[in-house]
Image (cartoon, grey):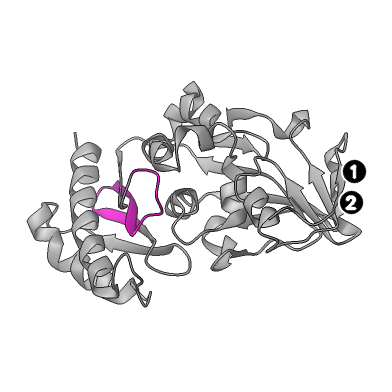
């Protein structure tokens, strides 16, 4: 199928883009890797597409004030290869799992956050790190904690008249360790289950994805940092947080089993890294 007719707008400023969105019946076009298929299948029929790809203030990657700032027009591939991403190791570990290289060459970091697929890696990374999503609309700018950003499957706290302008990831602190892993049928496919973890001392933060309608975050105290010692804890956690009914690719029990194993492995790895 082909997309339904729509108007096309390429604003010169973020304020102009926000004004077009405030007028109603408009969608933002950044990478288009999620939006264009939706349009082609006519699952979405916006009256106007607002192209933000050439807004210079949204095309920046920088480390400032203890945070990595990524603009809404920044491609995933650019972040993956950027020297600035070394300040946030978890992003570098997760990015190769985001789709395929060709998709990352067009898709944006903020676009993945705005799309909020339950199996997406970047919303889970943002939630694990305690990142913040920056939004602008008719009422000005506001900052939404990443753990409050996704409200359901492909649903976020973004208003219909608002525009995501960027995301801020806290840089890694001394003594922190990180882990990331997922299981998919093929590399680049949607994750059946995945985890992003951050460890500092005996405290850990774990974000699970692909097992619920949004990233599920839990804070843990690590008493036995070995994989074997962690397995009872992560298996109990998996039984609690996995609430998908399952599908042709994996049942609820199978996903819980995957999550328990991945979580124990990555928590142990992150703990070793934090204490190296």
Image location (x, y in percent) of residue 38: 65, 56
Q: In terms of image quadrants, where is residue 4? A: bottom right
104 vs 226, nearest the viewer: 104
* Residue that extends furthest to the left in the rendered view of this protein: 228
The answer to whether residue 205 is magenta is yes
Q: Is residue 243 above or below residue 162?
A: below
Pick the quarter of the image with the C terminus: top left
256 is higher (above) or lower (below) than 49? below
Count of numbered labels shown in the rendering: 2
Mark 2 surroundings: few (<14), some (14-19) or many (≥20) residues within 10 A: many
Which residue is drawn at the image coordinates 81% and 49% (left, top)? 49
**Disc 1 to disc 2, how far (Cα)?**
6 Å
Residue 111 location, x and y as percent?
62, 47
Residue nearer the viewer, 164 or 204: 164
Q: Is residue 131 visible?
A: yes
- Which residue is depicted at the point 45% across and 43% down? 99
Front-most of 276 and 120?
120
The mark found on residue 16 in the picture is 1
Name the residue rendered at 36%, 71% in the picture: 247
Q: Which residues are magenta?
A: 187-206
Where the N terminus falls, by quadrant?
bottom right
Main secondary structure of the magenta stretch? strand
Please, is residue 254 above or below residue 275 in the view?
below
Label placed on residue 20: 2
Residue 263 x %, y %: 24, 56
Q: Is residue 219 left or right of residue 79?
A: left
Does 80 sit left or right of 148 as displayed? Answer: left
The reply to whether the C-beta atoms of the residues labelled 1 and 2 are less than 8 Å apart is yes
Nearest to the observer: residue 184 or residue 242: 184
């Amino acid at each position: 199928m082909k997309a339904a007719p729509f108007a096309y707008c390429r604003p010169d400023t973020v304020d102009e883009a926000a004004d077009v969105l405030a007028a109603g019946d408009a969608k933002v076009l950044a990478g288009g890797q999620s939006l264009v298929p939706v349009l082609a299948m006519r699952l979405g029929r916006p009256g106007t597409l607002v192209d933000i790809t050439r807004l210079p203030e949204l095309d920046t990657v920088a480390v400032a004030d203890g945070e990595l700032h990524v603009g809404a027009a920044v491609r995933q591939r650019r972040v993956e290869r950027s020297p600035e991403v070394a300040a946030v190791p978890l992003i570098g570990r997760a990015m190769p799992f985001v789709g395929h290289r060709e998709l990352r060459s067009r898709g944006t970091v903020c676009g993945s956050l705005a799309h909020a697929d339950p199996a997406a890696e970047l919303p889970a990374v943002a939630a694990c790190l305690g990142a913040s999503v920056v939004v602008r609309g008719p009422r000005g700018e506001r900052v939404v904690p990443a753990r409050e950003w996704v409200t359901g499957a492909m649903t976020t706290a973004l208003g219909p008249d608002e525009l995501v302008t960027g995301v801020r990831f806290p840089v890694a602190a001394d003594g922190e360790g990180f882990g990331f892993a997922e299981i998919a049928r093929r590399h680049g496919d949607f994750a059946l289950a995945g985890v992003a973890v951050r460890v500092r001392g005996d405290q850990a933060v774990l974000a699970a994805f692909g097992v619920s309608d949004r990233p599920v975050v839990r804070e843990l105290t690590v008493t036995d940092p070995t994989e074997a010692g962690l397995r009872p804890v992560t298996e109990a956690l998996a039984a609690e947080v996995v609430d998908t009914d399952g599908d042709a690719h994996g049942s609820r029990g199978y996903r819980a089993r995957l999550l328990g194993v991945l979580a124990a492995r990555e928590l142990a790895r992150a703990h070793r890294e934090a204490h190296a």
